[in-house]
Image (cartoon, helix red, strand yellow):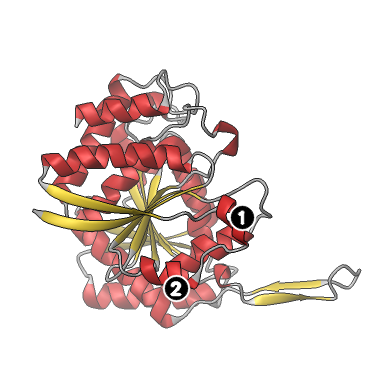
Amino acid sequence: MKSYNIAVIGGDGTGPEVVREAVKVLEVAAKKFKLKLDYTNYDLGGARYLRTGEALPDSVLAELRKFPAILLGAIGHPDVKPGILEKGILLRTRFELEQYINLRPVKLYDERFCPLKAKKPEDIDFVVVRENNEGLYTGVGGIVFKGTPNEVALQESVNTRRGVERCLRYAFEFARKRNKGKKLMLCGKTNVLTYAFDLWERAFHEIGQKDYPDIKREYAHVDATTMWFVKNPEWFDVIVTDNLFGDIITDLGAMVQGGMGIAAGGNINPQGTSMFEPIGGSAPKYTDKGVINPLAAICAGAMMLDFLGETKAAKAIETAVIKITREKMKSLAAGKMGYSTSEVGDLVAAAL
């Protein structure tokens, strides 16, 4: 029996509720596929920060390095100034554990929940590979003359050949393994961001031509990409982009696939500790009401199993989620599902 140690961070707001349902489903999958999942829970988030003044202690970060995977609920607290928890927990974990890929599948399970007219599940099935350790999110820059009429704010985008190349190689490998359209599209802004995306575009074609001749290479500006997400989502297979653009287009992707209630993501270190989460926020207004949709967290659990090499178990969870989405759910929005948070978890577990 294979055994895996998993770190669990429920986090803030509705995070603990959706993680609870994800673990419920993971336990059924573990039993079915003869796996052993051992969970270690960590108290990280806004409540701990308000209590102790610490976001992510060095000792906890050192412990997290020892796990192959982390299952995260949500980070974000209404009583903590924006940026403190995001930088102190999320970005620090992503950067220091070198989770240099943010992986976001965009897949429609039921056309009833797609806001786009006449689009069906076969039209919306693509993946965004977002660089997760560089770009504008490194925090390089500063403010001078703050609070005066002469104030100047600088925020610099950091793009290294090493960082860009490892992201591109991951995306090429993913497109090859996925074996759907065998297409990889670079999303950028070469006409304006001429330094950063000159590096991205040169590396993209050099690597593709030399090592991945079987993968068709395409390019689109980020503004055109958002337009085509809405107009022609069936065009896309795998998209690779930088940190900022990836952050933006994946939220649009979430809406196209049915909303935040179904959107899961992974922060991947292919050789190290990776973290999986529903991409929606902590939704504090729904906390402890039992109305939040746990399907995104359940899908994050499936992504985690896939990362661990348990592909059959991961696929079985996704199949169960698709069945419940199509046969049971009245809506994917909080409070409109027709079931409580725990009931949705029970339905998926039973289907599995």
Residue carrying label 1? 51
Q: Residues within 10 Å of mark 2 (few under 14, many from 20)?
A: few
- Tag count: 2
Indicate which disc residue 111 carries. Answer: none
Which sits in the foreground, 152 or 22? 22
- Quadrant of image for the C terminus: top left
Task: Inspect the image, locate mark 2, and give the three-letter code of the amino acid beneath it.
Answer: Glu
Q: Is residue 223 left or right of residue 141?
A: left
Which residue shows up at 41% across the image and 38% down it?
Answer: 18
Q: Is residue 240 left or right of residue 23?
A: right
Percent across and percent down for residue 145 are 85, 75
Splitting the image into 4 quarters, where does residue 319 fall?
top left
CA separation in Å, label 2 and label 1: 24 Å
Q: Residues within 10 Å of mark 1 (few under 14, many from 20)?
A: few
Splitting the image into 4 quarters, where does residue 139 fall?
bottom right
Which sits in the foreground, 170 or 293? 293
Percent across and percent down for residue 241 are 44, 63
- The answer to which of marks 2 and 1 sits earlier in the sequence is 1
Residue carrying label 2? 96
- Residue 133 in sight in this render: no
Task: Inspect the image, locate mark 1, and give the three-letter code of the amino acid beneath it.
Answer: Arg
In the rendered view, tell whether residue 296 sits above or below residue 112. Answer: below
Which sits in the foreground, 302 or 107? 302
